[in-house]
Image (tube, helix red, strand yellow):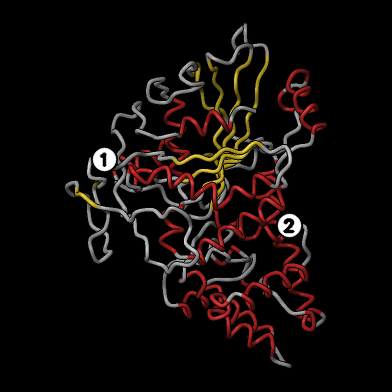
């Protein structure tokens, strides 16, 4: 630390979102911009700030390091968007900002699997309460009910068996995965504790090859009240408790230790997925906010400010007092519609922020890696990843395409496929000290680290 840097400001930022929301892309680009900061391409403090003396730091014990260099190499040389998060990752670094006097910064970025968000409703609920909530959704939502009917039939039988209930529940979860429904809980059916994701295959094969719990011997499923007193019902409750303790609690404890959250919502995917995906995403985020309870009272705000002045950074209390809601992939939206993307984000999740006292929230439409060019007629130019049939193709020449125009507001109902946005190959400079072009990533960083 410099002689004139009298204290350390520690910023802990959690990056969350449904799976495939672009968390790894955002973090890879962000690390590149921090490490090789160019004030003209990544503006801090409205252009007043610059980063100096950047250096990576070791991760906290128990955390895997976020391998930004490997992800960047895959973007450049393999033409691959980073693979999904399969574990809990942390990236830690220290630097000085020229616009922040008397303090250097210790930044900790947390990348957590989006699949685990579906388990947020477990925290603070026992097996009975979780079962009631889950079954209510499966029984009252027609989309879920249609895919889960064999399971609902099995738990309605007078002589229901453990094997049949687990088999039909796994089949229900497999059907939900194949229908791109994100409410998969226990989430280890979609991403197991070893970080192995479920692969697309026939529902029966998927159900036979995965498990709903910590392991094959530790599976559970939601049960109605009359079955919870059975021998297997009591076993399910014990397995549920172990699952919540070993999988859910560490995940949410990491988020609760943060000062700020970056909540990513891929609105292009939600628009393409239909109204059911929209409803599911709002439900998952609502459960997460209910558990994390972000915001602060007036007393907590005073205590936080006093701690910043008088306590070493390692002793300062942390709670989430700001949230950046981020709609990624701005470069896949026609230029004339980009204000609409931000409006749709606010309309979808603005209530979550408005209902929390003492929570500072901002909304951002971003592109962590700009991979298209805009044309005057509203079309885009990029290197497509798929042909007209949806088959993946190798990188080729640039091509013009016209994404779906965005609506002025969320429709009251819409089917999957009504909106479509092309997949393009990433455009990242081969030179390692030249970060990719970005839009508003610097603004997200400024907001999330102003703790």
Return the mark for residue 373: 1
Do we see residue 89 in this rendering?
Answer: no
First in residue order: circle 1 vs circle 2: 2
Identify residue for label 2. Answer: 123
The answer to which of 144 and 241 lies nearer the viewer is 144
- The quarter of the picture where the C terminus appears is top right
Task: Tell me where residue 89 sits by quadrant.
Answer: top right
The answer to which of 390 and 171 lies nearer the viewer is 390
The percent coordinates of residue 263 (x first, y second) are 56, 45
Instruction: Find the residue positioned furthest to the top.
Output: 3
The percent coordinates of residue 165 (x first, y second) are 65, 82
Instruction: Find the residue positioned furthest to the left.
Output: 397
The percent coordinates of residue 260 (x first, y second) are 63, 37
**Distance between the Cα atoms at labels 1 and 2?**
44 Å
Contact between marks 1 and 2 (CB within 8 A): the answer is no
SS under mark 2: loop
Around disc 1, counting alpha carbons within 10 Å, would you say few (fewer than 14), some (14 to 19), or many (20 or more)? some
- The quarter of the picture where the N terminus appears is top right
Left or right: 344 with respect to 63? left
Left or right: 75 with respect to 112? left
């Amino acid at each position: 630390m410099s002689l004139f840097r009298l204290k350390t400001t520690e910023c802990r930022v959690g990056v969350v979102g449904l799976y495939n929301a672009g968390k790894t892309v955002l973090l890879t680009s962000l690390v590149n911009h921090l490490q090789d900061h160019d004030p003209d391409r990544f503006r801090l403090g409205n252009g007043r700030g610059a980063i100096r003396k950047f250096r990576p730091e070791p991760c906290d014990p128990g955390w895997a390091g976020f391998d930004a260099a490997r992800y960047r190499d895959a973007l450049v040389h393999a033409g691959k968007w980073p693979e999904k998060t399969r574990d809990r990752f942390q990236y830690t670094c220290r630097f000085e900002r020229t616009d922040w006097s008397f303090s250097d910064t210790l930044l900790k970025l947390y990348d957590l699997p989006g699949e685990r968000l579906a388990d947020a409703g477990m925290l603070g609920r026992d097996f009975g309460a979780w079962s009631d909530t889950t079954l209510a959704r499966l029984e009252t939502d027609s989309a879920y009910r249609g895919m889960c009917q064999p399971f609902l039939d099995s738990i309605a039988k007078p002589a229901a068996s453990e094997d049949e209930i687990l088999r039909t529940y796994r089949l229900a979860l497999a059907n939900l995965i194949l229908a791109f429904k994100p409410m998969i809980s226990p989430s280890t059916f979609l991403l197991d504790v070893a970080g192995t994701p479920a692969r697309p295959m026939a529902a029966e094969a998927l159900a036979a090859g995965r498990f709903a719990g910590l392991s094959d011997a530790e599976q559970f499923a939601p049960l109605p009240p009359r079955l919870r007193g059975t021998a297997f019902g009591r076993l399910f409750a014990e397995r549920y408790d172990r699952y919540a303790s070993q999988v859910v609690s560490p995940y949410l404890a990491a988020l609760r230790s943060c000062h700020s959250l970056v909540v990513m919502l891929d609105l292009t995917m939600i628009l393409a997925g239909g109204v059911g995906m929209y409803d599911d995403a709002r439900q998952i985020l609502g459960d997460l906010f209910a558990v994390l309870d972000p915001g602060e009272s007036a007393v907590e705000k005073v205590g936080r400010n006093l701690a910043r002045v008088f306590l070493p950074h390692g002793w300062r209390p942390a709670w989430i007092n700001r949230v950046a809601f981020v709609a990624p992939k701005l470069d896949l939206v026609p230029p004339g519609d980009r204000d609409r993307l931000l409006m749709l984000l606010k309309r979808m999740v603005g209530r979550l922020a408005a209902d929390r006292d003492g929570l500072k929230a901002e909304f951002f439409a971003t592109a962590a890696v700009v991979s298209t060019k805009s044309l005057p007629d509203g079309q885009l130019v990029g290197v497509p990843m798929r042909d007209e049939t949806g088959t993946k193709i190798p990188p080729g020449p640039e091509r013009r395409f016209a994404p779906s125009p965005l609506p002025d507001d969320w429709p009251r109902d819409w089917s999957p496929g009504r909106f479509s946005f092309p997949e393009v190959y990433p455009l990242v400079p081969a030179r390692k000290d030249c970060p990719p072009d970005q839009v508003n990533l610097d603004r997200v960083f400024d907001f999330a680290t102003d703790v």
